[in-house]
Image (cartoon, grey):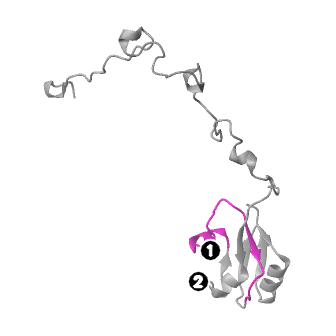
């Protein structure tokens, strides 16, 4: 596995680095390629925050601010009971849980908890395991002869 003569190659060369600020004859003297004055000519200059518009009032500050975003709000996957009635995959006695919903592409975001809502009609007797249920969904599932189980995420 040792070194062979055919493996030896000419080393890659890097040209001489540009030595800035070494006199006018060097081609990179005086202003050192930074032009004249301005923020980009200064030490540490030329880095602006993403919204900076050259001293003009930035767009984010010109637009009106409205509303409120609750940073503690829980995002849910939402499934209506009408989906179970429509789906050919759900038969009487089926246990509908997270794995079932993900496998049948009824919910997309696996990491989020999921809630069953009562929109639609249900005539199949199924067992539904979910993180949360609306009152109408609980009633509809139990009226159809099914069971409701609350599970933790």
Q: Identify which residue is drawn at 42% across, 8% down.
A: 22
Residue range of the region highlighted in magenta in the rendering:
97-122
Q: Identify which residue is drawn at 72% across, 63% down.
A: 113
On-image quarter of the C terminus? bottom right
In screen coordinates, is 100 left or right of 124?
A: left
Asked if 123 appears above or below 108 in the picture, the reply is below
Question: Considering depth in this image, is 81 or 20 the residue closer to the camera?
Answer: 20
Q: Could you tell which of marks 2 and 1 lies nearer the N-terminus?
A: 2
Question: Considering depth in this image, is 106 or 71 the residue closer to the camera?
Answer: 71
Q: Residues within 10 Å of mark 2 (few under 14, many from 20)?
A: few
Q: Position of residue 43 (x, y in %)?
A: 58, 19
Instruction: Residue lying at the far left in this picture: please name it.
Output: 5
CA distance separating discs 2 and 1: 11 Å
Q: Position of residue 59 (x, y in %)?
A: 69, 47
Q: Position of residue 61 (x, y in %)?
A: 75, 45
Question: Considering depth in this image, is 70 or 36 the residue closer to the camera?
Answer: 36
Q: Is residue 111 magenta?
A: yes
The answer to which quarter of the image holds residue 37 is: top right
Q: Is residue 96 magenta?
A: no
On-image quarter of the N terminus? top left
Q: Position of residue 39 (x, y in %)?
A: 60, 25
Q: Is residue 99 visible from the viewing direction of this image? A: yes
In screen coordinates, is 60 left or right of 2?
A: right
| Badge number at residue 106 | 1
**Residue beneath disc 2:** 89
| Badge number at residue 28 | none
Instruction: Residue lying at the far front in this picture: please name it.
Output: 36
Instruction: Residue lying at the far right in this picture: please name it.
Output: 135
């Amino acid at each position: 596995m040792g070194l062979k003569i055919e493996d030896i190659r000419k080393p890659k060369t890097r040209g001489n680095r540009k030595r800035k600020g070494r006199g006018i004859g060097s081609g990179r003297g005086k202003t050192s390629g930074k032009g004249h004055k301005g923020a980009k000519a200064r030490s540490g200059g030329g880095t602006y925050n993403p919204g900076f518009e050259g001293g003009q009032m930035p767009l984010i500050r010109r637009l009106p601010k409205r509303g409120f975003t609750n940073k503690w709000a829980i995002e849910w996957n939402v499934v209506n009971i009408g989906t179970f009635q429509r789906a050919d995959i759900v038969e009487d006695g089926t246990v509908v849980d997270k794995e079932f919903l993900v496998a049948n592409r009824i919910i997309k975001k696996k990491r989020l908890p999921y809630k069953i809502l009562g929109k639609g009609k249900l005539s199949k007797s199924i067992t539904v395991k979910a993180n949360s249920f609306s009152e109408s969904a609980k009633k509809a599932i139990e009226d159809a002869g099914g069971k409701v189980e609350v599970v933790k995420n």
